[in-house]
Image (spheres, coloured by chain):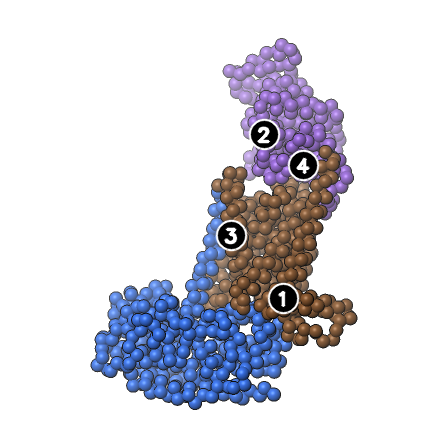
Amino acid sequence: MRVAAQSSARRLAGLALVVAVSAPLTACAGAGSAAEPSASPASPATTAPSADAYPITLDNCGFEVTFTQAPQRVVTIKSSTTEMLLALGVGDRIVGTGFPDGPVPPEYAATAADLPVLSDRVPSSEVVLEAEPDLVYAGWESTLSADGAGDRATLADLGVATYVSPSACKDPAYQPARLTFDGVFDEITEIAGALGVPAAAEALVAEQRTALADLAPDDRGLTALWYSSGTDIPFVGAGIGAPQMIMDAVGLTNIASSVTDTWASFSWEQVAADDPDVIVLVDAAWNSAEAKRELLATNPATANLTAVLNERYLVVPFAATEAGVRNVPAAVDLAGQLADLDLG
Amino acid sequence: MSLRLEGVRWSVAGRSILDGVTATAPGARLTGLLGPNGAGKSSLLRAVSGVLTPDAGAVNLDGTDLLTLARRERARRVALVEQEAAATVPLTVSEAVLVGRTPHASRWGGMTADDDAAVAAAIAEAGVADLADRSLATLSGGERQRAHLARALAQDPQLLLLDEPTNHLDVHARIELLDLLGRLTDRGVTVVAALHDLNLAAAACDHVILLDAGRVAAEGTADQVLRPEVLEPVYRVRCHVLTHPITGRPVLTFS
Amino acid sequence: MTARAVRRPVATGVLLAVAAVLLVVSVTVAVTIGPADLAPLDVWRSVADHLATLGGSGPAEPALGVLRDGIVWEIRLPRVLTAAAVGAGLAVAGGVMQGLTRNPLADPYLLGLSSGASLGAVAVLVLGVGVLLPVAAFAGAVVAMVAALSLAGSLGRLTPARTILAGLAVAQLCAAGTSFVIFWSATGDSYREILAWLMGSLAGADWPAVAIAGGAVVVLGTGLALQGRTLDAFAFGDTAASALGIDVNRTRWTMLTVVALLTGALVAVSGSIGFVGLILPHAVRLVIGAGHRRLLPLSALLGATFLVWADTAARTVFEPRELPVGIVTAFLGAPVFALLLWRRRSAAGDLA
């Protein structure tokens, strides 16, 4: 009995650790989960409400959110949400940010510099409430939990609205098969409507649609690996998320497109077997493109890849790889980098 | 091959367990180690077998000081069968008996022809040949006791120590065990057995050492030691000694 | 009687030979299986060419082309060989731990080794401590071992119960440290890398990994596997072992240290793969009995074969995606373990 008890305690400790780790992991996967609000069964109207359209009720990831007036004090969690407000010209309504993925694009830098940072990770609900927000806008659904920024229902009881980037909904009914730019634009339109700035959304979406239309996909029939992170097991952009959407736009064939997931653990052996023409490196503060470049060159399993031997790399900032206002600029930027590649 | 103890002392956590034991177990004889619970019988056997190191005193086997011998060297001369020796050992009898060859094996060694012969002889002598491939865990108490004895015999000891070997044995198994011990002394092995059962000691032992609170209260033949005036102060009971009508050995009754 | 005593070692030899053949066949076949579609003959020829090159007579240009040849020689073969070495080492280490502590639930990680190694590895993965991950993991394992043995030893003689409890204390402390580092500092992608490491993974096993794991198994694992007689003596309890001329305390210290160094080396290259060290020895015991002279070498060979196939499953079942092999061993191991407990329900009163 004693023996069994001690060992199960040890196992339990291990289990607890795994659970502790896997919870945020799910969050990570959820963040990439593509959503296409217009395709969702309970999706709200996509037409922008006028300023006197309040109250506005949205079905957000299956949670009903009602706005009686335009939120004026917003807490944004994850870079994608912060940048959404900045792009819509309402950065001044941000009373706190949390969990930044990296620096904001240069055009927002001046505004962003003054934003109060609540936490470089998920802020606790007390910290969020201390900022007295009327809206918490989260890039990952999992951050809106009791042990995170606060439970959605609890926040609602306190008069704080919550909104999750629809592409990050975890409920399968709200998580469509494949992220599209239309889905991204729908989110821009929806949140702008809730914020009472539909015109800003119209302008932004029109501008991004034009940029997208002007983007000429590469026609050389190139294959690519979207290398996000991982050393022993590469973690790559797979078939249904923002990486796939962006690669489609720039004319790259994703070697991991057959995997029905946003991001996925892949195998170096499969990479070597497919020998992609180019490799897209995700640049994050904790996992830089430079580090990945070095790893690819020194790992005997990858050193002889065509893309590695010829240094055919494209670099994309991590914050631009989550669904949001930076996807289109990222696609344009990648297309430019791709065009500059001399495949000899 | 007599065993000579001189002033053996051992204490644990300030409590004296063996308080200067001086006694002799004659060679090629069965010596009974008697005494009430807590008298120090098991500790004395452990001290002789080297499981514990006495604080003071000497342990001589045929003139050799066992305390100064290397462990393996001592284990080639002295074997110990513990009280209620591990019942759940999942080895087969022959595997268990082979373990008795440990002090004779080289550090990295496998089986040698000597091992084979010694194991076979020990199994035969202890009468467990029929059980050789059975797991120890499936044996009856008497069978298991004989298997443990076979393991000790595989050590090829000059001195065999047994701690309460007859506990949990039925009458038949006890008689068999005593017969076996008799055969061992006949071929020159010195046997010392800690015993609870005074009548068993009276019936079988050539020599008796009576311990009380870590000291030797009496020592001698069964006739000399197993007398009311010796036993009563040690066991604190009324005791009567009769004479066995056939063997002529003492028979004890208590009240 | 003599006939029986003689027949046993022969039977052991046959068992070991069969297990060895099984391992060689498994390695040979497993190396032909993978996400990349390579013909078995091409794979073997690639390996043969490389072996010939090592001998100085191979072809200058790989027949398969640089990349496909790299798949065989740089990815698959080192990985399969590392799996074999790690499986063998964990199985031996587990069998020895169970024997030394007379605890059926003991495993190679008993002294807090996996927790210590995890702390070292997580420190590298999350905090970016500037050393190689295997070095940090090994250092963590050794520190945990020293802490556990020091604690157990400071209590007096190194009894099984003290060993287990001291290991538990160290494991809990390291686990808390690991959780703290993860909770406090891990960002985005590092969670998944940590999880993969904690579950144990052979992805990324390269030739240095083969050298580390293989070297540790050949030197330390073989040494342990030859201690069967001593461990059989331990089965009778510390008193009996001592009366058999074994210095119980010193032997236990030495063997625990060797197990810890071996396990530390394995953990350094593969993370803490579960269940192999716990289950394999039990499974082998069920078939051939508990005598350590047979148990340990046979566990080594079967553990190697088991992990080779578990890892083959990990890298191919969901291809082109990968699973940490620890998940596969747990999936296979947990039901076996449950069955084992069920089968022992009557025999093992101490487990009830």
At mark 2, the secondary structure is helix
Q: Which residue is drawn at 58% across and 30% down?
A: B140
Q: Residue at x 32, y 68 (%)?
A: A62
The label number, if any, that marks residue C334 in the structure image: 3
* Rendered-image quadrant of the C terminus of chain A: bottom right
N-terminal of the pair, mark 4 or mark 2, is: 4
At mark 3, the secondary structure is helix
**Relative to the observer, which residue lies in front, A163 or B67?**
A163
- The image shows residue B89, relative to residue B143, as above or below, that is below
Instruction: Chain letter for mark 4, please.
Output: B
The chain letter corresponding to brown is C
Three-letter amino acid code of the residue under disc 2: Gly
Q: Where is residue B90 in the image (x, y as percent from the top left)?
A: 60, 39
Q: State whether discs 2 and 1 lie on one chain.
A: no
Q: State whether discs 4 and 1 lie on one chain.
A: no
- Residue C157 visible in the displayed image: no
Mark whose residue sits in front, 3 or 2: 3
- The image shows residue A308, relative to residue B196, as above or below, that is below
**Relative to the observer, which residue lies in front, C225 or A57?**
A57
Dot 3 alpha-carbon crowd within 10 angstroms: few under 14, some 14 to 19, many 20 or more: some
- Residue B176 visible in the displayed image: yes
Number of marks in the image?
A: 4
Q: Distance between the residues labelled 2 and 1?
A: 55 Å
Q: Mark 2 points at which residue?
A: B141
Dots 3 and 1: beta carbons under 8 Å? Answer: no
Three-letter amino acid code of the residue under disc 4: Ser
Instruction: Chain letter for mark 2, please.
Output: B
Mark whose residue sits in front, 3 or 4: 3
